Amino acid sequence: MLLGEYQHNLDIKGRMAIPAKFREKLATGAIITRGLDNCLFLFAKNEWEALAQKLVALPLAQANSRAFVRLMLAGAMDVELDTQGRILVPDYLRKYAGLKKQAIVAGLYNRIEVWDRETWERYKQKTESASEEIAEKLGELGI
């Protein structure tokens, strides 16, 4: 289970430390890709395989399906933890997420999201101020 919010810095080469409590889950390799809301998604290999199977099963004839599959799969890159527990975030993904020096690493159960700190703060503030409305909509879905 991947849970928690951590702040880490990216070095000049684009390397970023992964929180120690997440490293075991990623020890056999991981996949980083474009996420939603201008963040990056980081998956352990087994979680990525499960998602990728669902993605490739989406209907090819639907434009939204093709677009989402391209977003997730074409942007994906294998990453490995180095001896210091860091991953190298590819330049094109750093640009996509607007990552500067400070990043937020957020554990969301089966994936990690990587955010530029300023973008995360704006997103979090917006979401927290709408939490009652969001909860009400989720209630309609039975949650």
Image (cartoon, grey):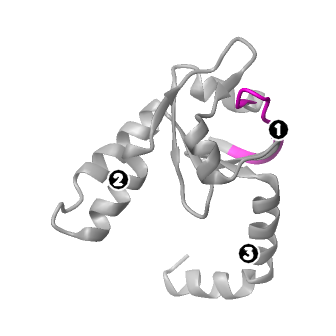
- Residue type at mark 3: give it: Thr
In x, y percent, where is residue 83?
Answer: 70, 11
- Please give the residue where the numbered disc 2 appears in the rendered image: 70
Instruction: For mark 2, give the secondary structure.
Output: helix
Label 3 SS:
helix
Say which residue label 3 marks.
127
- Of badges 1 and 2, nearer the viewer stands 2
Query: Along the horizontal axis of the image, is 5 left or right of 43?
Result: right
Position above or below: 32 against 51: above
Q: Is residue 9 magenta?
A: yes
Mark 2 is on which residue type? Arg
Identify the main secondary structure in magenta. strand
Q: Position of residue 110 (x, y in %)?
A: 55, 45
- Image marks 3 and 1: residues in contact by CB distance under 8 Å: no
The residue at which mark 1 appears reads as 8
Quadrant containing the N terminus is top right
Q: Position of residue 32 (x, y in %)?
A: 53, 38
